[in-house]
Image (cartoon, rainbow, N blue to C red):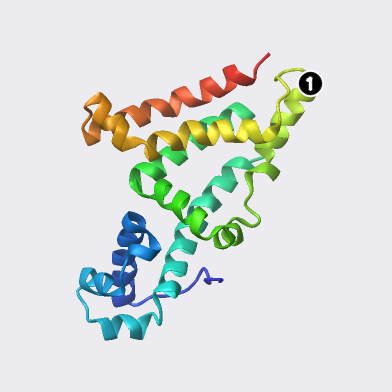
Amino acid sequence: MNIPSDTKYSDTEIKIKNAAKCLFLKKGFSATKTREIAKESNINLALLNYYFTSKRKLFEIIMLETLHDFLSKMVEVYNDEKTTLEEKLKLTSSKYIDMMIAEPHLPTFVVNELKNDPSSFLKILKGKMIMKSKLVAQYNDGVKKGLYKKIEPIHFVTNILSLIVFPFISSPIIIKMQKLGKNDFIEMMNKRKKLIPKWIIQMIKK
């Protein structure tokens, strides 16, 4: 499904999309009911069906826009010809964490929906894969020059994403275990913006 970048939505459509996005991120596609979306949007069900003919269509529009905007920003970081690998790691960590602080339900949502419908997410990811990025090319180049340890690039990428994403997925456990407030957890993640690039470099440097 392709959503034109210049698509214009009415105020009512925007209200519906915002309400649906919150519900989808919190509950997932299957558990979210159209009546809930209508209620959160403060409209009747008939009007919801008028603007968006099905829950699936509304879901695809929202997820495509959300992930497309985020991944497009990250692709710019991964493929920037002017920045070094270490600079890319810093920007990747910072931007991912900022995104997840703003959308705290997004990591768990993506994991769940990947299990339920991996083909849809692969369509969204098409052309935006980190494995073919300048970031990975710079790592491979560093290996050839003897700067970095030789490991399979998939492990290099997985380590980056795991260090960033896992704390958000396991946040209920971390918060309870450490007796943290919401702001404490955000402060912890902001500190990790600087720590994660350092850890990655320590792992790969000879």
**Does residue 197 appear to the left or right of 135 in the view shown?**
left
Where residue 63 sits in the image (x, y, percent)? 45, 62
Quarter the N terminus occupies: bottom right
* Amino acid type shown at disc 1: Lys
Q: Residues within 10 Å of mark 1 (few under 14, many from 20)?
A: few
Please report the residue visible at 52 percent of the width from the left and 25 percent of the height from the top: 197
Extreme residue in the right direction:
144
Say which residue appears at 69% left-offset and 29% top-offset.
Answer: 139
| SS at circle 1 | loop
Residue 139 in the figure: left or right of residue 9? right
The residue singled out by tag 1 in the image is 145
The quarter in which the C terminus is drawn is top right
Quarter of the image holding residue 121? bottom right
Seen from the viewer's position, the closer of residues 190 and 176 is: 176
| Residue drawn at 27 percent across, 26 percent down | 177
Relative to 91, does residue 60 appear above or below in the rendering? below
Residue 48 vs 165, above or below: the answer is below
**Residue 186 appears in the picture as rendered:** no
